[in-house]
Amino acid sequence: MPFPHSVREEALVKAKRRCCVCHEFAGRSINVHHIKQEADGGANTLDNAIVLCLRCHAEAGHFNPKHPLGTKYAPSELIKHRDAWFEACEHGNIQDTSTVEVKVKRTYTTSDLHKYILLFTFHNGNENAVSGWKLDVLVPYLFKVSTVEFDTYHDVNVDGKRYNKFQTAGSDVLYLGESVELTDSNIVKIEYSIDHDIYHSARVEESKIIWIFYSSSEPPIRGELSWEELQQF
Ligand SMILES: [Zn+2]
């Protein structure tokens, strides 16, 4: 039996239709999930309900203590996420939860040369619509970089280290809950390569990539990719 309508509605309102685990606004792509499965005697009550986006729901649904693979969500952990998020929604200000997701994707490999592209996705979690954005990516000067639709600024100094700065911008209008790919694998592209020599110098310097996302509607969002995240040698 599914949850009664009243329980679903109460859970969705308490979570502000955001995922209790990753806090993304999920709109219609949201589930009210049984923390303890019905087959195991879980009740159809608010106590046993958690609001999850599709991605987290898939992860939570596959929890099986007999076959641990990765770190899945245990029911006891889900309860903690749910309680913390309900609490935050009730008392906290959760307006500024826009996020920038960054993925490093390897596109070319030989024993001496690796190439990677950076995939940036922005998610607007703010009530205010975004009507324009700009992305700065600071890449250690040692790395060889090729870009499409990025402007280049050479030799930028941050905390005593040398970077080349790459900048791109867009004029997408994005409402609450909408996402846009800021870069992809060909139209707006940033790719760096690391060979044997670069690897050894960059490892000594603990090189990292710094990025800053500016939008029309909120303070800049800044992040870093550590040396460990930047290469798979
Ligand atoms: Zn989620």
Image (cartoon, helix red, strand yellow):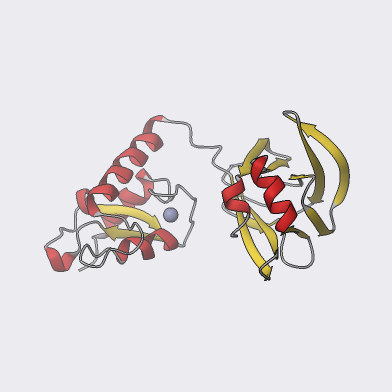
Measured as percent of width and height from the top left, residue 84 is found at 33, 38
Residue situated in front as seen by the camera: 80 or 205: 205
Measured as percent of width and height from the top left, residue 145 is found at 80, 56
Q: Quadrant of the N terminus?
A: bottom left
Q: Residue furthest left?
A: 41
Determine whether, in the image, residue 19 is placed left or right of residue 197: left
The answer to whether residue 173 of the structure is visible from this angle is: no
Q: Quadrant of the C terminus?
A: bottom right
Measured as percent of width and height from the top left, residue 209 is found at 68, 45
Measured as percent of width and height from the top left, residue 69 is found at 33, 64
Q: Answer with the quarter of the image where residue 2 lies.
A: bottom left
Q: Residue at x 24, y 56 (%)?
A: 35
Determine whether, in the image, residue 62 is placed left or right of residue 122: left
Determine whether, in the image, residue 101 is placed left or right of residue 60: right
Residue situated in front as seen by the camera: 164 or 171: 164
**Count of marks placed on residues:** 0
Determine whether, in the image, residue 76 is placed left or right of residue 182: left
Q: Residue at x 48, y 56 (%)?
A: 26
- Ligand 1, by image quadrant, is bottom left
The answer to whether residue 70 of the structure is visible from this angle is: yes
